[in-house]
Image (cartoon, rainbow, N blue to C red):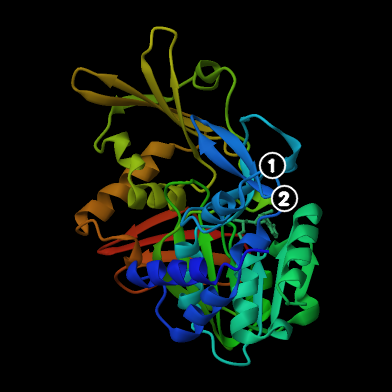
Amino acid sequence: MTDTAHERRKLAALLVQEGALKTPTWRAAVEAVPRELFLNPGVFLPEGGRWRPVTALGSDPAKWIQTAYSPDTLTTQLDGHLTADQVNEPVAGLPTSSSTMPALVVSMIESLDVEDGHQVLEIGTGTGYSAALMCHRLGEDNVTTVEVDPEVAERADAALEAAGYSTWTVTGDGLLGHPRRAPYDRVIATCLVRRIPHAWVRQTKPGGIILATVGSWANGCGLAKVTVNEDGTAEGRIIGKASFMQARSQATVPVDGDLSARAAYADSERQVKVSPLLMDEWMPSFLTQLTAPGAQLVRARTSEGKQLLYLFDPERESFAEFIEDGEGWRVRQGGPVALWDDVEESLTAWQGAGSPDITSVRLHVTDRCHTYWIGGQQITTRTSSHWIGEGSALRWQHRLTDRP
Ligand SMILES: C[S@@+](CC[C@H](N)C(=O)[O-])C[C@H]1O[C@@H](n2cnc3c(N)ncnc32)[C@H](O)[C@@H]1O
């Protein structure tokens, strides 16, 4: 077996240079854990809109090692089942498991603020590489990692064993945490969640930290870091941008089919006050999701090549259709919720506050309600609606129940 100590040191040096790797103990972990052990049987590399399979066995050893130490995310599974050893040609597909780009893995685990002896729960084992880094830092008995896909979990478990870590690899839905090993000092999720499940809060010690990417759109998610309070609530803020594959049970079912039929009956039509193209930017996209959590941004083209842009909220049977005319954009809205009225109000208030970036968003999590806000005081009296603007304060509430 090739000794990859040189590649590991090189990767660590690159991560230090990029500012992702900061502390000597995590640097030692990156230098110690061979990433190639976690990529069996192979990876899919992007190529012209498809995925080219590359396996360890079928590759020149030097080239394989070069691939394994790429600073990019390496996709290891497509469409919930396909691995690189099962195909010979580039294929289409949706990534469903991967070894996340090392810079993101490392900057996240740096943000966890772990200390010796901490018990960590990881959601989304994937290849097991990030779990291995944590095992190196904290010891194998202090790391529990949950993977929803049994085959992925089995491969990760074998890789962790091969790397010398007999840690707790659990197969199951990580949204439920893993109560049997609770309470934890730290919870980290490497899959995207719509909101922080209260199971994680319950399974974390007071003072403990939960780190997870929240959202459901690939280009507008926030990395949330919250601290658990004595009273079983949690609070913190969005510390940056990050994007992961969605937790499987929350995966969005894309709106497709006859879009014009979905948008046939509008209740109103008007000129927009804010360009809908703003939703292509990260922070406005994040705010749109806070305002209309079930909505999807859908782009299409007519047979004549005209651009079509929609917001659809299938659960609330509502839509906004954006039409570009000579003057700018018009919006047609239909269904019980005027989606764009809400989103536009939210975006206008954000612009009015000076367009602060995503790290200005704070959040408070209880078992019944998630409140996000920017500036001002958090007020918990209002009971409905996703978006609430109050004076200079921007606030979004997602209530799980109407009970007080
Ligand atoms: C981006 S990969 C994880 C990367 C991994 N930590 C690594 O460094 O190799 C995300 C993983 O989360 C898993 N996943 C998705 N939903 C999950 C859930 N509800 N519970 C546990 N794992 C889940 C996926 O199957 C996938 O393997």
Residue 106 is situated, as x and y percent measured from the top left of the image, at 48, 70
* Residue at 66% from the left image edge and 56% from the top image edge: 39
Instruction: From the viewer's side, name the closer residue of 112 and 341.
Output: 112
x 43%, y 29%: residue: 310
Number of residue marks: 2
Q: Please, what secondary structure does the residue beneath circle 1 have?
A: helix
- The amino acid at mark 1 is Ala
Mark 1, residue position: 84
Residue 240 vs residue 83: left or right? left
Report the residue that reaches farthest toward the top.
304
Q: Is residue 379 visible?
A: no
Out of 123 and 169, give the one closest to the viewer. 169
Q: Position of residue 194 (x, y in %)?
A: 57, 55
Residue 164 appears in which quarter of the rendering?
A: bottom right
**What is the CA distance from the residue labelled 2 to the residue labelled 1?**
7 Å
The relative height of residue 88 versus residue 38 in the rendered view (above or below) is above
Could you tell me if the residues under marks 2 and 1 are in contact, i.e. CB atoms within 8 Å? yes
**Horizontal arrangement in the rendering, residue 103 relative to residue 248 (left or right):** left
**What amino acid is at disc 2?**
Pro
Q: Is residue 388 visible?
A: yes
Q: Which residue is mark 2?
A: 41
Give the quarter of the figure containing the C terminus.
bottom right
Q: Is residue 396 above or below residue 15?
A: above
Quadrant of the displayed image that contains ligand 1: bottom right
Label 1 crowd (10 A; few <14 / some 14-19 / many >=20) = many
Q: Position of residue 375 (x, y in %)?
A: 29, 69
The kind of secondary structure element at disc 2 is: loop
In this rendering, position of residue 319 left or right of residue 358: right
Q: Residue at x 23, y 56 (%)?
A: 355
Task: Pick whichever, 402 or 54, lies toward us.
Answer: 54
Farthest bottom residue in view = 117
* Sequence order check, earlier mark of 2 and 1: 2
